[in-house]
Image (cartoon, grey):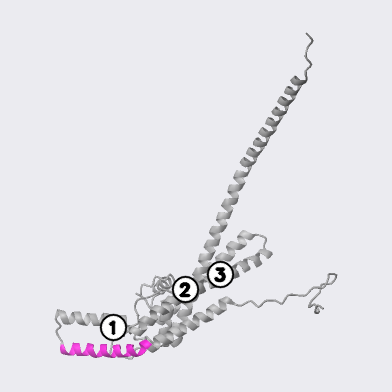
Amino acid sequence: MAGPCCCQNPGSPPYCCKPERFRVPITLILLILYFCYLLLGATVFWALESEAEHDLALNFQQEKWELLRNHTCMDNKTLEMFISGIINAYKNGINLLGNDSGQETWDFSGSFFFSVTAITTIGYGNLSPSTVGGRIFCVFFALFGIPLNVILLNRIGQKMLYLVQRYSNFLGTKIQRKKMVKLFSSSCALFAGLLLFFLLPPILFQWMEGWTYEEGFYYSFITLSTIGFGDYVIGRDPNKQYPNWYKNVVSLWILFGLAWLALIINLCINLLENCRKVDHCCKVRQTYPVDQELIEIAQNGQVASRLKEAEDSQSSTASDTKPESPD
């Protein structure tokens, strides 16, 4: 015997409702996995590189002052060695000014920021792992992190595009002009992204780094375009004390800024597809009258040929049935 039905409509036969399936929030799971992956990378880089960075900074400061103390007049070889040491120290993120060896480039926030720049392929080039373990881990971290980053950015871009389209449909129900509404919603998404990711961040960089607004805007574009020259990098001034939240906020800005760029790419793809559909429809409309005329001509030709065949058959029948004249 069948069990009781869970719902019925008045005036209709009873039926059992299927249980509603639970939709797994894939984007949320990917976002959590992404941040856990970044935290894992930050923890490993912090453990592998922080102690080595402290030792390198201490050795550099000792060698620098010993060299300056013993060589008041440097020859070419000594000067080249000194310059080589400076370049090596800079690549490892060591402070070159003063007598400060207590650097914190590879602290947790710095390691987290490096993890973000690694898997987003920005790669400023001003910082790289110096230990063998850190380099090996960086290879595998980027190998699995870059595809994860691409998948997540694509998902977030699609979600943003869905919100823009939903907003456009909502306005479409209020205003009966679909083309104008789509243009307005796309313009709002573009302006909001420009404001949040290009126009406002230079003010933060101007306050924290002492850059000009133009330098901050230049850094924003070079970072979000993943060019990453490395001529401007945050948190590198040894005379400034940066708060712990600073690099974490910039890391989130990079993530959502790249997602906004993915949204712009999706909007451009949809625009090109719509233009292609409109062009195809116009071509179909232009060729439709010609095709119809050809069809009518072909049909008229077939009718004419059939009439001619019928007349020929009638004339031949008449000639066959004509009585012969008597001799």
User: Which SS type dominates the magenta stretch?
Assistant: helix
Question: Percent from the top left, x then y, of residue 321?
Answer: 78, 20
Horizontal placement of 59 versus 229: left or right? Answer: left
- Labels 1 and 3 touching (C-beta < 8 A): no
Q: Position of residue 113 (x, y in %)?
A: 42, 81
Quadrant position of the C terminus in the picture: top right
Q: Nearer the viewer, residue 41 or 108?
A: 41
Residue 120 picture location, percent across and down: 44, 74
Question: Closer to us: mark 1 or mark 2?
Answer: 2
Residue 69 or residue 41, whichever sits in front: 41
Residue type marked 1 = Ala
Q: Which mark is residue 290?
A: none
Q: Which residue position is annotated with label 2?
A: 147
- Examine the rendering and report whether any part of residue 242 can be seen: no
Mark 2 is surrounded, within 10 Å at the Cα level, by few (under 14), some (14 to 19) or many (20 or more) other residues, namely few
Query: Given the image, on which type of amino acid does mark 2 rest?
Result: Pro
- Residue 253, can we see it? yes
The vertical placement of 205 against 310, above or below, is below
Measure the C-alpha gap from mark 3 to mark 2. Answer: 17 Å
Look at 67% across and 76% down and name the residue there: 21
Q: Dividing the picture into quarters, in which one does residue 309 lie?
A: top right
**Residue under numbered circle 3:** 158
Crowding at dot 1, Cα within 10 Å, few <14 / some 14-19 / many 20+, comes out as many
Residue at the far front: name it: 327
User: Which kind of residue does numbered mark 3 sit on?
Assistant: Gln
Q: Earlier in the sequence, mark 3 or mark 2?
A: 2
Q: Residues within 10 Å of mark 3 (few under 14, many from 20)?
A: some
> x%, y% of residue 61?
26, 89
Which residue is tagged 1?
A: 89
Disc 1 to disc 2, C-alpha distance: 32 Å
